[in-house]
Image (spheres, rainbow, N blue to C red):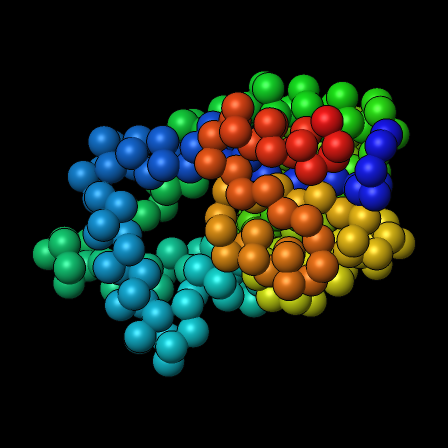
Amino acid sequence: MPGRIEAVVSDFGGVLTTPLVESFMAFQDRTGITAEHLGMGMQAATEANGGDNPLFEMERGEISEATFLEKLTAALEPLLGHPPEMHTFREIYFEALDPNPPMIELMRELKGAGYRMAMLTNNVREWEPLWRPMLPVDEIFETVVDSGFVGCRKPESRIYEIVLDRISLPAEACLFVDDVQVNCEGAEKAGMTAVHFQGTEQAIADMRAALGG
Ligand SMILES: [Mg+2]
């Protein structure tokens, strides 16, 4: 275990799973609602919500999934000209989401090599029973910081502090990996080394390099 890194802090969706874009494509195939519609709907829902993005509120556990879907449905209806069937979103999203075996194997190897392992996920409280069984979470990770249960989300500085509190290590000892650039920037601001996941091979190579080969 060379180098100064002692812990790995991994995202869940899009890193330990197949790309999230596949889930949005599956939703489009089944409902005709495109990712562009969803983006416009989210923007309209944010404006209707006084500037607070309801997705972020749900991810912080401030509103339920049901309330989030009501807000998004109300915003999408005038854009689509009909009420969308948003209640199918969760099922379709998870049906299209698979584990990413090489990344999971890397996490297992790093744990075996003595690294402390933590997961840091922006997630939805109601989705925990769906995502947790996809991975050997408890075998690999000593702690899971889930935005829906801690009341803050990446890239807010507080959520990186929660991870550091849980593992009792300084930020400089942590290697963070995430498929969302702003989350990596938040981790770097907190003092962690960050790898922006853009593909499995690239992320594994970059993580190994950051860990000192
Ligand atoms: Mg992600």
In terms of depth relative to the viewer, which is nearer, 208 or 92?
208
Vertical side of 169 occupied by 142: above or below? above
Q: Is residue 184 left or right of residue 92?
A: right
Where residue 153 appears, as percent x and y from the top left, is 59, 60
Q: Which residue, as the protein is rendered here, is positioned at the far left?
A: 81
> Is residue 189 something that shows in the picture?
yes
Looking at the image, residue 187 sits to the left or right of residue 198; the answer is right
Residue under the image location 69 percent in, 37 percent down: 210
Q: Tell me what residue is drawn at x 64 percent, y 57 percent.
A: 188
Answer with left or right where residue 70 lies relative to residue 16. Answer: left
The N terminus - image quarter: top right
Q: Residue at x 22, y 44 (%)?
A: 34
Q: Is residue 150 visible?
A: no
Residue 8: x percent and y percent? 74, 40
Q: Percent x, y for residue 51? A: 38, 77
Residue 141 placement: quadrant: top right
- Foreground residue, 175 or 123? 175
In the current view of this chain or complex, which residue is farthest to the bottom? 50
Q: Is residue 154 above or below residue 115?
A: below
Q: 80 or 145, which is in the foreground?
A: 145
Instruction: Give x and y (percent) for residue 18.
Output: 47, 28
